[in-house]
């Protein structure tokens, strides 16, 4: 029986490049791996995890879906299980923003034009991951808000272009989610966390002014993804954070698995 994907993983599956190999890194119970393998759209499907336990569950999922012969399971840390040019898409779902970029930093071959599409569902600090991607030469293919198990997530897809930029805080907070019907709900959720964050930002700084401006708005302003802007034209009135400390974490709750049950990570 083919597993049913929640809204997050279903959105991620739609962003995988068809006709090219794909790797589901941190595959956990293997639901996404099984759905990708059963679709027949990809010449190779790889499911990988750091721990033997999840891989054993993934093997069972593949067997129940009768697609064990169309997927390969690998044990290993991050992208170390892959070789350069082996896949066209990489899925990193259900891990924190920091873990996501740490995994990418250990694989220099993803930082090249024409490299793999990186599909991410950060469990924490969506704003921080957006900033990191822009500052390290990635451009967004998609930035979609989805709701699962009563929580909001951002399903991101990015590709390396080598063009770096210093985004404004509002861009990092909302990304390109405003063009989706669910964008207003996601923006309200992000905005609700700002008062707590504002307590740690010194008065009179550009960041404090931008947060205050967002809090005064009835509907949070949302910026279009960078790819939607005319080439060479910056977003209107950008406010960069040169010389300022990074914003404090927004206090999002991490998920340990991709089943949508919303278990809190034990610190």
Image (cartoon, grey):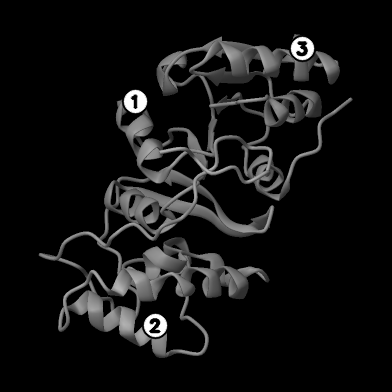
Q: Earlier in the sequence, mark 3 or mark 2?
A: 3
Residue 67 at x, y percent in the picture: 80, 16
Residue 193 at x, y percent in the picture: 43, 69
Q: In which quarter of the image is residue 182?
A: bottom right
Q: Which of marks 1 and 2 is nearer the N terminus?
A: 1
Left-right relation of 234 to 73: left
Which circle, 1 or 2, is nearer the viewer?
2
Decide: is 127 above or below 19: below
For the residues labelled 1 and 2, the Cα–Cα distance comes to 37 Å
Residue at coordinates 28% horizontally, 60% vertically from top-left?
248
Left-right relation of 264 to 239: right
For the residues labelled 3 and 2, the Cα–Cα distance comes to 49 Å
Q: Quadrant of residue 165?
A: bottom left
Which mark identifies residue 214? Answer: 2
Label 2 crowding class (10 Å Cα cut-off): few <14, some 14-19, many 20+?
Answer: some
Decide: is 254 above or below 144: above
For the residues labelled 3 and 1, the Cα–Cα distance comes to 28 Å
Residue at coordinates 60% horizontally, 35% vertically from top-left?
257
> Between residues 108 and 227, which one lies in front from this camera angle?
108
- In which quadrant is the C terminus drawn? top left
Q: Earlier in the sequence, mark 3 or mark 1?
A: 3
Decide: is 98 above or below 251: above
Q: Name the residue under label 1.
A: 107
- In which quadrant is the N terminus drawn? top right
Residue at coordinates 55% horizontally, 66% vertically from top-left?
177
Which mark identifies residue 239? Answer: none
Which mark identifies residue 68? Answer: 3
């Amino acid at each position: 029986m083919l597993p049913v994907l929640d809204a997050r993983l279903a959105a991620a599956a739609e962003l995988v490049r068809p006709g090219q190999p794909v790797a589901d890194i941190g595959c956990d119970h293997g639901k996404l791996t099984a759905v990708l393998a059963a679709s027949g759209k990809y010449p190779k499907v790889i499911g990988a995890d750091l721990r033997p336990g999840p891989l054993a569950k993934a093997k069972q999922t593949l067997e129940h879906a009768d697609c064990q012969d169309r997927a390969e399971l690998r044990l290993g840390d991050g992208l170390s299980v892959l070789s350069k040019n082996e896949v066209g898409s990489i899925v990193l779902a259900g891990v924190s923003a920091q873990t996501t970029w740490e995994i990418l930093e250990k694989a220099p071959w993803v930082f090249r034009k024409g490299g793999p599409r990186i599909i991410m569902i950060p469990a924490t600090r969506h704003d921080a991951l957006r900033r990191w991607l822009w500052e390290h030469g990635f451009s967004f293919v998609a930035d979609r808000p989805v709701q699962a198990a009563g929580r909001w997530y951002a399903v991101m897809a990015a590709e390396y272009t080598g063009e770096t930029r210093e985004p404004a805080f509002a861009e990092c907070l909302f990304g390109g989610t405003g063009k989706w019907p669910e964008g207003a709900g996601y923006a309200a959720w992000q905005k609700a966390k700002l008062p707590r964050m504002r307590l740690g930002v010194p008065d009179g700084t550009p960041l404090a002014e931008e947060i205050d401006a967002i809090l005064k708005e009835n509907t949070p302003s949302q910026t279009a993804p960078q790819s939607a802007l005319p080439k060479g034209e910056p977003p209107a009135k950008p406010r960069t954070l040169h010389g300022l400390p990074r914003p404090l974490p927004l206090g999002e709750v991490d998920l340990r698995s991709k089943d949508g049950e919303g278990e809190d990570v034990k610190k």
